[in-house]
Image: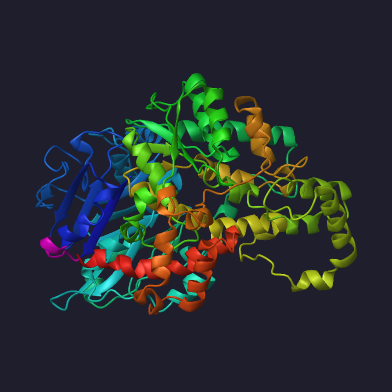
């Protein structure tokens, strides 16, 4: 896990180094740069696999003693040293040991124990087809010194970020710039202005703009996941100012089963268990300490319990870290969002000591504008609890976490059940089971029995075809999309076009601000393909969402957690913070100061600042207590804090 930066053709070294410094937090262990007339490559390194300087980047191919990166400025005669490729790479290739053996059989020789060298050799051996051989997460660039082509790629699901811009430099020459974060591109821009899409993204598409090429900054675009592109140095200088990304992967091309004719549920449970343990084992490959951000929910608990199980039972995976017993739990004392009792049950079950972190917003709030600068984007909840959690993990000496992200989107953790209810409209037992999943959760507006009756009445009496035809229906042009049931189509849309991309962005930022790599076993591409090839009845079953996870892993998890029905997101108790003053570790004074400040009331990015001022005062005075209203305040305050954070880009 690292930060990458590059330009074609090459850039002024002073400007380039200043830009690279902005992403030092992504790779605090070392940095390296490479310049020639065609390219400038920069890399900030977080050491995880092969901690030696031999594995530093930019890395060259073929690799030998004369061109090893070493984390220093390089001025290399690529022709004299017969260098074909140069690489900057952010991410991990988890199956690099298996690929390495495959490449050795083809005659390749390796000089490091890194996945970076395996990536380069794979590209040399297979070209762009190497991407489908990788099990991992990545954003990388390879420059071919013979053809002067730059190859860019991003992983299947968008776990690793990649941004780019076409610019005109101080000498009026055209350039292409790419980077792990937008802030590394800022120094190359003439002006730093909000995008023309800003208001639409923030107020209408807060969960989904991550799935588009648009960013909050004018002139910077997002490279799409599951794509690659090739761009030539000469073409940039000849005026080319757009990319032509090519898609290399689609979930629906890789489903192992037909969802309409599934295998027996018991067989699927066994197969899921095997896949999940294998995914965890691969992601435990590390030369540094591992841990997890544990919430006490099913997903993160399943992950660390699987780590415990794998560490005791797996002998087939090499390079697994034995130092994995680190769990950090964010606690929100005296709020509805505290799950620490469940997290403690998990720690006790696998006999580890958890680190219980009481989130004190006051300790972080003087840095909130700098956090916005580091985070770059906007979201519905404050980043402070997550940043504080990963900060505490880093302070324990942990560099990598295995977290439970992605399971909600795969298994309906968000309570999106209306469409599955429609599918089950003539099966009262199925209706009962699905509605029962809402019990004891924030989705349940009524007592369960009344919910059953009202739901059945609604479905069987009122929800006719005419009404259904007026509802939004998920769609995709892929021919296999219609093999999915209606409920699975909604999950597919959440996964590919909505919430997941935003979640992946958020957790990349929360963790990398602190120099932590997050790995996600539920997002192994084999497991994702497997789950989307199943009917919804294998995901919601016997009154439970995430049925497959629960049935496959119930023997390795505490009963109080595996059969939980309540669901909480990792959010900030913003209303409680707004209603407590500073001496109670609250933020009441801070919010009221902003609400009455002139620059807030005159901020042109804030929609209806006077109305927002009124709402802030109501919450602070305890005239309004609804969490959703607090979320609304935070969302509408975001643009003001984001605008103020840009001052850090100008320092």
Residue 391: percent from left, percent from top: 35, 42
Asked whether 4 or 119 is in front, the reply is: 4
Reply above or below: 143 against 329.
below
Asked whether 145 or 32 is in front, the reply is: 32
Tell me which residue sits at (57%, 55%) in the image: 495
User: Which quadrant would the C terminus be assigned to in this image?
Assistant: bottom left
Left or right of residue 59: residue 504: right
Left or right of residue 588: residue 4: left
User: Which quadrant would the N terminus be assigned to in this image?
Assistant: top left
Find residue 95 and report its image quarter.
Answer: top left
Tell me which residue sits at (43%, 62%) in the image: 224
Tell me which residue sits at (50%, 67%) in the image: 616
| Res 129 visible | no
Residue 591: percent from left, percent from top: 43, 63
Residue 246: percent from left, percent from top: 43, 63
Q: Which residues are magenta?
A: 9-15
Residue 13 within the magenta-colored segment of the rendering:
yes
Reply above or below: 99 against 252.
above
Residue 307 within the magenta-colored segment of the rendering:
no
Q: How many labels sit on residues?
A: 0
| Res 181 visible | yes
Q: How is the image coloured?
A: rainbow
Residue 378: percent from left, percent from top: 43, 63
């Amino acid at each position: 896990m690292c930060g990458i930066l590059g330009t074609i053709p090459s850039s002024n070294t002073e400007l380039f180094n200043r830009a690279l410094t902005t992403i030092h937090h992504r790779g605090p262990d070392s940095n390296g740069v490479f310049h020639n007339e065609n390219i400038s490559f920069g890399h900030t390194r977080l050491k995880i696999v092969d901690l030696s300087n031999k594995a530093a980047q930019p890395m060259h191919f073929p690799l030998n003693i004369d061109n090893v990166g070493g984390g220093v400025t390089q001025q290399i005669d690529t022709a004299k040293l017969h260098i074909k490729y140069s690489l900057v790479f952010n991410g991990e290739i988890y199956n690099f040991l298996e690929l390495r053996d495959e490449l050795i059989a083809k005659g390749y020789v390796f000089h490091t124990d890194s996945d970076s060298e395996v990536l380069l050799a794979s590209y040399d051996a297979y070209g762009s087809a190497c991407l489908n051989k990788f099990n991992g997460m990545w954003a990388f660039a390879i420059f071919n010194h013979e053809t002067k082509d730059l190859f860019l790629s991003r992983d299947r699901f968008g776990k690793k970020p990649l941004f780019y811009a076409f610019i005109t430099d101080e000498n009026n020459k055209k350039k292409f710039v790419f980077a792990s974060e937008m802030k590394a591109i800022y120094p190359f821009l003439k002006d730093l202005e909000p995008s023309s899409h800003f208001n639409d993204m923030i107020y209408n598409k807060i969960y989904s703009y991550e799935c588009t090429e648009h960013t909050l900054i004018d002139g910077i675009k997002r490279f799409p996941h599951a794509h690659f592109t090739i761009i030539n140095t000469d073409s940039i200088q000849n005026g080319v100012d757009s990319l032509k990304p090519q898609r290399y992967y689609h979930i629906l091309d890789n489903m192992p089963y037909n969802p309409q004719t599934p295998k027996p549920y018991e067989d699927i449970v066994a197969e899921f268990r095997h896949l999940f343990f294998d995914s965890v084992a691969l992601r435990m490959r590390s030369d540094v300490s591992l841990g997890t951000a544990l919430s006490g929910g099913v997903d993160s608990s399943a992950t660390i319990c699987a780590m415990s199980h794998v560490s005791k039972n797996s002998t087939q995976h090499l390079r697994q870290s034995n130092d994995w017993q680190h769990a950090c739990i964010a606690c929100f004392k005296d709020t509805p969002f505290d799950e620490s009792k469940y997290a403690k049950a998990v720690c006790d079950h696998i006999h580890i000591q958890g680190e219980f972190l009481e989130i004190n917003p006051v300790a972080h709030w003087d840095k909130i504008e700098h956090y916005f600068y580091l985070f770059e984007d906007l979201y519905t909840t404050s980043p402070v609890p997550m940043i504080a959690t990963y900060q505490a993990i880093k302070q324990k000496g942990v560099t990598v976490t295995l977290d439970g992200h992605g399971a909600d989107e795969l298994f309906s953790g968000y309570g999106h059940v209306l469409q599955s209810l429609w599918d089950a409209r003539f099966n009262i037992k199925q209706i009962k089971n699905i509605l029962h999943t809402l019990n004891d959760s924030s989705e349940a507006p009524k007592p369960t029995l009344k919910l059953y009756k009202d739901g059945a009445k609604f479905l069987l009496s009122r929800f006719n075809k005419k009404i259904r035809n007026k509802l939004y229906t998920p769609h995709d042009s892929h021919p296999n999309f219609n093999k999915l049931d209606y409920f699975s189509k909604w999950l597919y849309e959440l996964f590919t076009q909505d919430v997941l991309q935003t979640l992946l962005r958020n957790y990349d930022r929360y963790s990398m601000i602190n120099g932590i790599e997050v790995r996600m076993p539920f997002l192994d591409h084999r497991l994702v393909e497997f789950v989307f090839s199943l009917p919804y009845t294998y995901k919601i079953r016997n009154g439970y969402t995430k049925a497959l996870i629960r049935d496959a892993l119930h023997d390795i998890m505490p009963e109080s957690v595996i059969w939980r029905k309540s669901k909480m997101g990792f959010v900030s108790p913003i209303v409680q913070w707004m209603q407590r003053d500073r001496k109670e570790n609250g933020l009441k004074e801070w919010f009221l100061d902003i609400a009455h400040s002139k620059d807030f009331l005159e901020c042109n990015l804030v929609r209806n600042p006077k109305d927002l001022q009124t709402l802030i005062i109501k919450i602070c005075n305890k005239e309004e207590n609804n969490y959703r209203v607090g979320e609304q305040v935070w969302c509408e305050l975001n643009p003001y804090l984001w605008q103020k954070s840009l001052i850090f880009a100008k320092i």
